Amino acid sequence: MFNKKIILKGTLVTLKSMCEDDFDAIVGWRNNPENMRYMNQPFTLTLELQQRWYEKTYLPSNDILFIFIENSTGKKFGTVGAYDFRQEKSTIVTGRLIIGEREFRRSPELLEGMILFYDYLFYTMHNQTLYCHVAEENKPAMSLNRRFGFVENAGKPIYPRWREANNIKLTELVCDLDSYEIKKAELLPMLQHFVSQKVNETKNVRKP
């Protein structure tokens, strides 16, 4: 079973594993029609259903679900998770990515948060290969995954049961450690620039 109490702290954002205090935000994000379109959730989520899934499915499982939290304000703005960890193969599946607050969808906070997430999966959990499943028409999600080194799995699908959600066909993407490190090296200078800007803005605000 995964450690369910994980905190990954960056300069701009913190990833914290989900707890019951996050349920209100999660239910709101998951019931947003814009988000539901690409999710395997053909029903309205309630707090009761969320609590039941948390207790009966999530806690006993090898799933991990992180909440993105902006450091400067403490605002929660989305989720990202991983599941089906196969230690013997050093593989895991990523997903459940929801950016619930629109202003963070192309933000440096999201960029740093995704690096914290992938660093944890590759370097702390020692996975060698990540998989995910994304609708081709979900352009923002497809683009975000490709930025971090994911490409279409050209071979036989490893997870055929996850190739469809809400009657939408999903593409199986794969990313190995080498590909991630190449993309991360390209992204870090941009992230460092954003971090410097944010730090300077904060200093200027605090000046009398």
Image: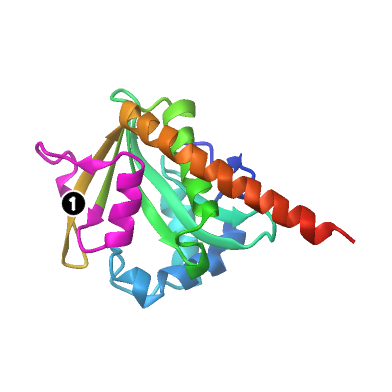
Residue 37 horizontal/vertical position (percent): 29, 71
Q: Within the magenta stretch, is there residue 147?
A: yes
**In the image, what residue occupies the spot 83% across and 58% down?**
206
Residue 87 horizontal/vertical position (percent): 35, 26
Seen from the viewer's position, the closer of residues 62 and 40 is 40
Q: Quadrant of residue 92?
A: top left
Residue 140 horizontal/vertical position (percent): 33, 60
Q: Quadrant of the C terminus?
A: bottom right
Answer above or below: position of 96 versus 102: above
Mark 1 secondary-structure assignment: strand
Quick one: which residue is furthest to the left in this view? 156
Dot 1 amino acid type: Thr
Seen from the viewer's position, the closer of residues 63 and 33 is 33
**In the image, what residue occupies the spot 41% across and 75% down?**
32
Quick one: which residue is furthest to the right in this view? 208
Q: Which residues are magenta?
A: 134-161
Q: Dot 1, crowdedness within 10 Å: few (<14), some or many (≥20)?
A: many
Question: Please, which colouring scheme is shown?
Answer: rainbow
Q: Quadrant of residue 159?
A: top left
Is residue 95 in view from this perspective?
yes
Q: Within the magenta stretch, is there residue 208?
A: no
Is residue 116 in view from this perspective?
no
**In the image, what residue occupies the spot 48% across and 49% down?**
111
Q: Using residue 158 as the reference point, say whether residue 35 is left or right of it.
A: right
Seen from the viewer's position, the closer of residues 171 and 202 is 202
Residue at image mark 1: 171
Answer above or below: position of 110 versus 155: below
Q: Quadrant of the N terminus?
A: top left
Q: Quadrant of residue 53?
A: bottom left
Q: Using residue 9 as the reference point, say whether residue 151 is left or right of it.
A: left
Residue 45 horizontal/vertical position (percent): 41, 72
Q: Using residue 38 as the reference point, say whether residue 100 is left or right of it.
A: right
